[in-house]
Amino acid sequence: MKKTVAIVGGGTAGLFLAAFLDPAIFEVSIYEKKKSLARKFLVAGDGGFNLSYSEQMDALVKAYTPDSFLKEALLSFTNDDLVAWLKAIGIPTFVGSSKRIYPQKGIKPVEVLQAIEAVLEKKKVNIKCTKKFTGWDSNNNLQFNNKETVKADITVFALGGSSWKVTGSDGLWLDLFTAKKVKTLPFQAENCAFKINWPTDFIKKHEGQPLKNIA
């Protein structure tokens, strides 16, 4: 009998997990609070749609702090493995001058997402949108929208951070975990901000655009 797997969160992490679980062993469902999957993934392409980095794996592992946290995962599925898998599902890639790995020119983020969704459909993954995780019931079953209860053999939380509220990454789930007495760490900013008194006309023209190749 198959084990049921509930993946809470329909972002990149949740989609990749579902894409690689064996459908002969697991019956997989993804629960996403938005009306569609991978909202952050889709808008990320506005600033350059890099899918990975072509650095040698020993150097790539050391780019993370602490590097031991992701070492085993990175070495078990390398950047070369990712490129090979993307090619297999119809997304050829190329390495840019910055060593970043991009989809072949002309391929949009939505096309990459559609290719991944086709893999999920073939594996009969259940996609359930507009399902906001709101905690657990008295038997530790998952609750969505404060009323729907889901019981699963295995639950994986792929809820993301608090970096981009409009895409669903609001980090509000942290309060639920804290109330459940699950050990958590508060979110911390990864980027460093600088306050610059830009001219008003400059802001009107360029606000929201990325600043690149500057020192």
Image (cartoon, rainbow, N blue to C red):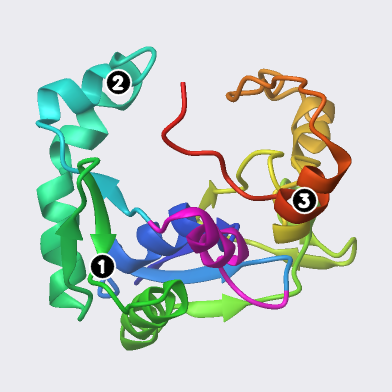
Q: Quadrant of residue 78?
A: top left
Look at mark 2 in the image and give the residue it sits on.
63
Q: Magenta includes 9?
A: no
Residue 193 visible in image: yes
Horizontal and vertical percent for residue 52?
28, 47
Mark 1 Cα-neighbour bin, 10 Å: few <14, some 14–19, many ≥20: few
Secondary structure beneath label 2: loop
Secondary structure beneath label 1: loop
Q: Earlier in the sequence, mark 1 or mark 2?
A: 1
Look at mark 1 in the image and give the residue it sits on.
22
Type of the residue with mark 3: Lys
Q: Looking at this view, name the residue that lies furthest to the top.
A: 66
In contact (CB < 8 Å): disc 2 and disc 3? no
Count of number-bearing discs: 3
* Foreground of the two, 170 or 51: 51
Look at mark 3 in the image and give the residue it sits on.
165
Horizontal and vertical percent for residue 90?
20, 81
- Left or right of residue 23, residue 43 in this image: right
For residue 55, above or below residue 166: above
Q: Earlier in the sequence, mark 1 or mark 3?
A: 1
